[in-house]
Image (tube, rainbow, N blue to C red):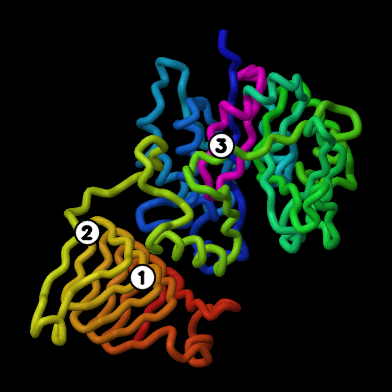
Amino acid sequence: MATKVVAMILAGGKGERLYPLTQDRAKPAVPFGGIYRIIDFTLSNCLNSGIRQIHLLTQYKSLSLNRHIIQGWIHYFNGELGEYINLIPAQQRVGEDWYLGTADAIYQNIYVLQMDRPALVLILSGDHIYKMNYQDMIAYHRERQADLTVAVIEMPKHLSRHFGVLQVNEDFRITGFQEKPEVPQTIPGQPDWILCNMGVYVFNTETLVRRVIEDAKDPHSAHDFGKNVIPAMVAQDRVYAYSFRDENKKTSKYWRDIGTLDAYYEASMDLVSVDPEFNLYDRDWPIRTYQPHYPPAKTVFFEDGGTGRTGGAYNSLISSGCIISGGKVFRSILSPGVRINSYAEACDSILMDGVNVGRRARLNRVIVDKDVKIPEGFQIGYDLKEDAKQFTVTESGIVVISKGTILE
């Protein structure tokens, strides 16, 4: 009989560093790559790995995420076969607090595990971009007879302040854990590299329940897996590291925590490069999502051999329902229903659903959230000092226009 595995996806983060893209939505619901939401990559990994019992733990601004799951994901699961994807909001079942940390989110939902009674629990973050077969990690966990297995990836040591850093012995058993250290312990023999925690865990259910209950009783704990639970387990349980095996079919491993606007923009722009690091086009590892019923994308007008009004897109991702009507698009991502009007130009930009760019408007290195209308003749991204008076401008000079913005 196959080992019963239940996935619990932590999808309640505020995503404060992605503001204003998280002004009205949780981080896992932020659009990415034209037609996707960030949560789609973790959920696609689950389906492609044969994980079909999933609890999605939500909390902040969950309406957009809930709607996306209901519209695009529920139909993949057959209840008659015991499959499900459950949306579980923070409920204050065990007290008056909302989720205090990643470990507390599991603690507050122990009743779910008591109902399901799985042998193993796969705990995932709902806001990372990567491709991974979780069954390989589960098999590794069982071979090692581990209590906890932590997925790890090699990263340059200067990034240590952003990640949990692990130390392992020759058997890859974890011997130490540093949470976002200023001075990390590097990989032996590789002084410029560290082993980073990916936020992907396989727990024996009994051990998980015992450890999060213990953590909940500690008044000094931040109730976080990386800060508290895992370091405590290293000394008393069988805790192993699992080296990330990438399903992306590229020479280097791809895993991104797009937690800042600049990181989000950089990962997005990779998709329009000639040979992207992240492969969206692998039919053996499909990325699923909800797609509304739009007509095909369309370009119109070609006048004066290209010197007059010309509608075209170059090195760009163009989603269904887009109309490029006499304007030009360069190295940009257009979500469904975007319209580029005559003589307008969008360069190195990300335009989300329903954005309308008026005639002769020009956008350069701009992220425009849903349904914003860019008036005729507007120029954004060319004078950052002026832009900063109205919009968010990142350290690298990306202008972000939030949902609901009215430009005049």
Q: Which residue is mark 1?
A: 331
Q: Which residue is mark 2?
A: 321
Of the image marks 2 and 1, the number of the one nearer the N terminus = 2
Please tell me whether mark 3 sits on a helix, a strand or a loop.
Answer: strand
Q: Residue at x 28, y 58 (%)?
A: 319
Crowding at mark 2 (Cα within 10 Å: few <14, some 14-19, many 20+) = many
In x, y percent, where is residue 324?
A: 20, 70
Q: Which residues are magenta?
A: 113-138
Q: Nearer the viewer, residue 392 or 271?
A: 271
Image position of 36 (left or right of 225): left
Which dot, 1 or 3, sits closer to the camera? 1
Amino acid found under the numbered disc labelled 1? Arg
Give the label on residue 88, or none: 3
Of the image marks 2 and 3, the number of the one nearer the N terminus = 3
Please tell me whether mark 2 sits on a helix, a strand or a loop.
Answer: loop
In x, y percent, where is residue 325?
A: 17, 73
Which quadrant holds the N terminus?
Answer: top right
Q: Is residue 388 above or below residue 202?
A: below
Q: Extreme front residue here? A: 189
Amino acid found under the numbered disc labelled 3? Ile
For marks 2 and 1, give the CA distance: 19 Å
Amino acid found under the numbered disc labelled 2? Gly
Q: Residue at x 57, y 58 (%)?
A: 258
Which dot, 2 or 1, sits closer to the camera? 1
